[in-house]
């Protein structure tokens, strides 16, 4: 979008965000019946980072570096700590 006016980039970005929120708000309302707010937030962040990583590698042709692996491991740790209480008696 470098050759397009900044207005077009803004409209595109806001349309993506609007679509995301159209899915996110109902999902959070449904999910809040079963999960805590903190758990839903961690799930949202993990999904966002997975989609962003895929976009970065496939579309933007970013190289996968060890920093990405370590950051992913931190996300796995966050999921573990948020959900570990659900599976203990």
Image: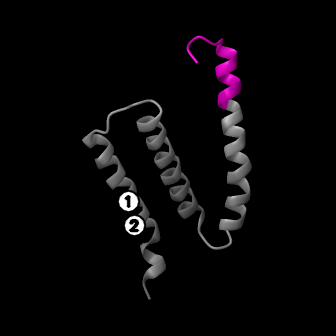
Residue 4 is inside the magenta segment: yes
In this rendering, is residue 50 above or below 39?
Answer: above
Residue 29 has which mark?
A: none
How many marks do you count on the picture? 2
Residue at the location (40% across, 59% down)? 78
Cα–Cα gap, marks 2 and 1 = 6 Å
Residue 46 position, x and y percent, is 48, 53
Residue 36 position, x and y percent, is 59, 67
Q: In which quadrant of the rendered image does the C terminus lie?
A: bottom left
Identify the residue position indicated by label 1 in the image: 76
Residue 62 position, x and y percent, is 37, 32
Q: Secondary structure at mark 2?
A: helix
Asked whether, in this view, residue 33 is left or right of residue 53, the answer is: right
Secondary structure predominantly adopted by residues drawn in magenta: helix
Which sits in the foreground, 55 or 67?
A: 55
Identify the residue position indicated by label 2 in the image: 80
| Tag 2 and tag 1, C-beta contact below 8 Å | yes
- The region drawn magenta spans 1-13
Which sits in the foreground, 72 or 35?
A: 72
């Amino acid at each position: 979008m470098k050759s397009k006016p900044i207005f077009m980039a803004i409209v595109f970005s806001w349309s993506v965000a609007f679509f995301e929120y159209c899915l996110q708000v109902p999902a959070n309302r449904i999910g809040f019946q079963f999960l805590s707010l903190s758990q839903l937030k961690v799930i949202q962040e993990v999904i966002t980072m997975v989609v962003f990583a895929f976009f970065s590698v496939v579309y933007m042709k970013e190289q996968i570096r060890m920093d990405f692996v370590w950051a992913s491991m931190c996300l796995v740790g966050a999921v573990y700590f948020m959900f570990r209480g659900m599976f203990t008696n």
